[in-house]
Image (cartoon, rainbow, N blue to C red):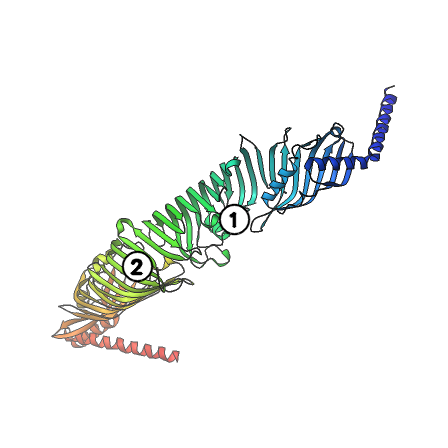
């Protein structure tokens, strides 16, 4: 019996629904007109409904489409393509209109225009008709917001929820793919509590900084136009950020806070900002503040104060080619550590220490550095002051560029061996963006003086050219800084030096030197030329020393190969002339003619020099030994030895002449 009863009930229900549906369809136009009249009276503006849909299942409701609020749709700040309403049936018959959802489609305009529009349509006029209208939800999608500079943001979906009393209780703003969601709920009177999550999110205002992930929460104080982000966590550019931030916009836009950055790729961030001067892994613990009339200008002039650590980075001159890491590197450093302050285009670095392994095994600094730039970033002035004011570098504006002054006293060179500078004065002029002209060098070190001038360039690599003279420098303490004790005496020289490298840190690796030199009242260590000349045998002479009154010649250093030519040595007991070469591995090769007294005549004995700079080996050349043996055999000891050495020496010179002639013929 149950089956027929159920079937009968189902048929009755269908018939009832059909009857109601037919009744509603028959009165659709009447409902259409009544709903338009009710909305017009409630909102005090003519309201037209383009289309009315009726639904009975699962709940009876009306969907009014293509609605126009005649005056309220014509906002100068907002364009709304379509408005639709979902209205509950059950409330209409009781004199109430419950709008379960109001749809705003294809909105374009300013955020202020959108807020104004929602406020108007969500608050019917007071003192109006007795008909009650309750709005539960507003959904706007897609929404494209226009900034004051007419830049389009979005598209977004906005959802506004209203409570039983009609007040707004919840707002949700999200991108259409929900990669970024902002939720706002009512807090204490005059405040809103918000939470924000995002992935692969780009800041809508200012430079296109991209974040892998952002989580933030805080409070919005509406009466004070202040947004407090009390908990901020983000991941971006291989690093992380945590902190607290405040955003205000009462009289002007203000952004300030305290943040901690860890392992942020500085080069990638600067590339996003259109800059490329610096790269490295950034750590930062400090405060910042930004002010601007527009939010898009907040990052244009920030104020920063905090502790900075930059690791495994480089300074780039002239940018990086196509963004490739390592290209355009001027100086690579392992670590840069200090406090930083930046305000009004003035940068201050305090107690800065820099580790540059290519220049020095020890950290450089601490230094205090100040930089002043104009609005376009061009340098106006700079200063660098070392510890105890022993080093000062000043750069100031001049009529034809920037003037450069360097002053030092009781100061060790920071790069390479710790050469002690008694005093140094350097004056120069910036000649373009990649060229420093050094007009005057005046210094003192190890009891002597240095004077000169030069040029430094850093376009397409680094190059330094110097020319000048050195007077009276004590060689022994100077060479001790190179961990060597090869020579002592007072050093004089006139010549040129050229340094070139792809990076500044490599400049001193392969210097080129061409100079004429003189050493007075000195000593050659680990080399006894007189003893080697007196011992006419095949045994090497090592150790000892050679004192002298005068040593002169010409030095030429190219690609690590040092050539000492036209050497002349004078001492009280003998003379010497010759040439010597030192290869990049410190191996010695050369011949020195040592003049010794034999039978009241000065005879030059050619001494071959070999071994290394730390352990030279001396002995007469094979030609001299062979000549000495032959002369002794023919004429006997004494005179035969002397004449034999002279003959051997002549044979050697004749052999060298034939070799040069053969070489010249091959090159013709």
Is tag 1's residue or tag 2's residue first in the polypeptide sequence?
1
- Mark 1, residue position: 296
Quadrant placement of the N terminus: top right
521 horizontally vs 258: left or right:
left
Query: In terms of secondary structure, where does tag 2 sit?
Result: strand
Q: Would residue 558 be visible to someone looking at this image?
A: yes
377 horizontally vs 530: left or right:
right
Residue closest to the far left: 600
Instruction: Give percent across and percent down for residue 170.
Output: 60, 33
Image: 108 above or below 432 = above
Mark 2 surroundings: few (<14), some (14-19) or many (≥20) residues within 10 A:
some
Image: 407 above or below 15 = below
Q: Nearer the viewer, residue 340 or 103?
A: 103
Q: Residue at x 26, y 49 (%)?
A: 388
Instruction: Give percent across and percent down for residue 611.
Output: 27, 62
Q: Are marks 1 and 2 in contact (CB under 8 Å)?
A: no
Instruction: Give percent across and percent down for residue 658.
Output: 31, 79
- Mark 2, residue position: 405
Query: In terms of secondary structure, where does tag 1 sit?
Result: helix
Residue 307 figure quarter? top left
**Badge number at residue 553:** none
Residue closest to the far top: 1
Instruction: Give percent across and percent down for residue 232.
Output: 49, 38
How many numbered marks, from 0 up? 2
Q: CA distance from mark 1 to mark 2?
A: 40 Å
């Amino acid at each position: 019996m149950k089956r027929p009863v159920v079937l009968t009930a189902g048929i009755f229900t269908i018939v009832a629904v059909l009857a109601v549906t037919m009744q509603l369809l028959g009165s659709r136009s009447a409902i259409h007109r009544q709903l338009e009249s009710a909305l017009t009276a409630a909102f005090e503006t003519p309201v037209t409904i383009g289309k009315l849909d009726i639904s009975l299942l699962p709940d009876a409701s009306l969907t009014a489409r293509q609605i126009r609020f005649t005056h309220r749709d014509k906002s100068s700040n907002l364009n709304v393509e379509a408005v639709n309403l979902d209205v509950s049936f059950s409330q209409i018959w009781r004199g109430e209109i419950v709008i379960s959802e109001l749809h705003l489609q294809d909105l374009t305009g300013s955020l202020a225009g959108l807020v104004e529009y929602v406020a108007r349509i969500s608050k019917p006029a007071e003192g109006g008709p007795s008909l009650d209208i309750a709005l539960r939800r507003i959904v706007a999608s897609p929404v494209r917001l226009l900034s004051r500079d007419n830049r389009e943001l979005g598209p977004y979906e906005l959802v506004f929820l209203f409570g039983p009393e009609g007040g707004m209780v919840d707002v949700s703003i999200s991108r259409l793919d929900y990669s970024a969601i902002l939720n706002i709920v009512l807090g204490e009177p005059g405040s809103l509590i918000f939470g924000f999550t995002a992935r692969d999110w780009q800041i809508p205002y200012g430079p296109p900084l991209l974040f892998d992930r952002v989580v933030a929460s805080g409070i919005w104080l509406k009466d004070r136009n202040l947004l407090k982000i009390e908990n901020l966590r983000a991941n971006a550019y291989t690093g992380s950020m945590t902190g607290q931030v405040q955003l205000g916009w009462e009289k002007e836009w203000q952004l300030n806070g305290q943040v901690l950055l860890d392992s942020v790729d500085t080069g990638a961030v600067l590339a996003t900002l259109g800059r490329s001067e610096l790269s490295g892994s950034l750590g930062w613990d400090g405060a910042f503040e930004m002010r601007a009339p527009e939010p898009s200008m907040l990052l244009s002039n920030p104020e920063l104060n905090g502790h900075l650590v930059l690791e495994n980075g480089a300074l780039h001159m002239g940018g990086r080619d196509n963004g490739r890491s390592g290209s355009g590197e001027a100086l690579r450093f392992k670590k840069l550590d200090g406090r930083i302050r930046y305000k009004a285009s003035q940068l201050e670095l305090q107690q800065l220490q820099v580790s540059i392994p290519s220049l020095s095994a020890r950290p450089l600094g601490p230094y205090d550095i100040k930089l002043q730039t104009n609005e376009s970033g061009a340098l106006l002035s700079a200063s660098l002051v070392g510890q105890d004011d022993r080093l000062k570098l000043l750069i100031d504006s001049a009529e034809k560029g920037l003037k450069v002054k360097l002053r030092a006293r009781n100061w060790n060179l920071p790069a390479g061996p710790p050469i002690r500078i008694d005093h140094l004065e350097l004056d120069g002029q910036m000649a373009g963006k990649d060229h420093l002209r050094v007009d005057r060098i005046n210094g003192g070190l190890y009891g002597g003086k240095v004077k000169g001038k030069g040029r430094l360039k850093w376009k397409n690599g680094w190059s330094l050219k110097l020319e000048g003279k050195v007077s009276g420098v004590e060689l022994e303490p100077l060479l001790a800084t190179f961990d060597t004790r090869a020579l002592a005496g007072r050093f004089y020289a006139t010549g040129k030096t050229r340094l070139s490298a792809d990076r500044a840190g490599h400049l001193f690796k392969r210097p080129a030197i061409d100079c004429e030199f003189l050493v007075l009242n000195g000593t050659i260590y680990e080399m006894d030329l007189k003893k080697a000349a007196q011992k006419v045998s095949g045994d090497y002479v090592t150790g000892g020393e050679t004192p002298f009154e005068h040593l002169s010649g010409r030095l030429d250093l190219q690609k690590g190969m040092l050539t000492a030519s036209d050497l002349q040595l004078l001492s009280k007991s003998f003379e010497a002339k010759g040439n010597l070469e030192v290869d990049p591995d410190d191996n010695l090769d050369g011949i020195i003619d040592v003049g010794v007294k034999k039978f009241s005549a000065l005879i030059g004995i050619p001494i071959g020099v070999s071994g290394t700079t730390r352990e030279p080996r001396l002995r007469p050349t094979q030609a001299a030994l062979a000549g000495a043996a032959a002369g002794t055999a023919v004429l006997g000891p004494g005179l035969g030895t002397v004449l034999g050495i002279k003959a051997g020496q002549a044979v050697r010179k004749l052999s060298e002449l034939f070799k040069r002639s053969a070489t010249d013929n091959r090159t013709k």
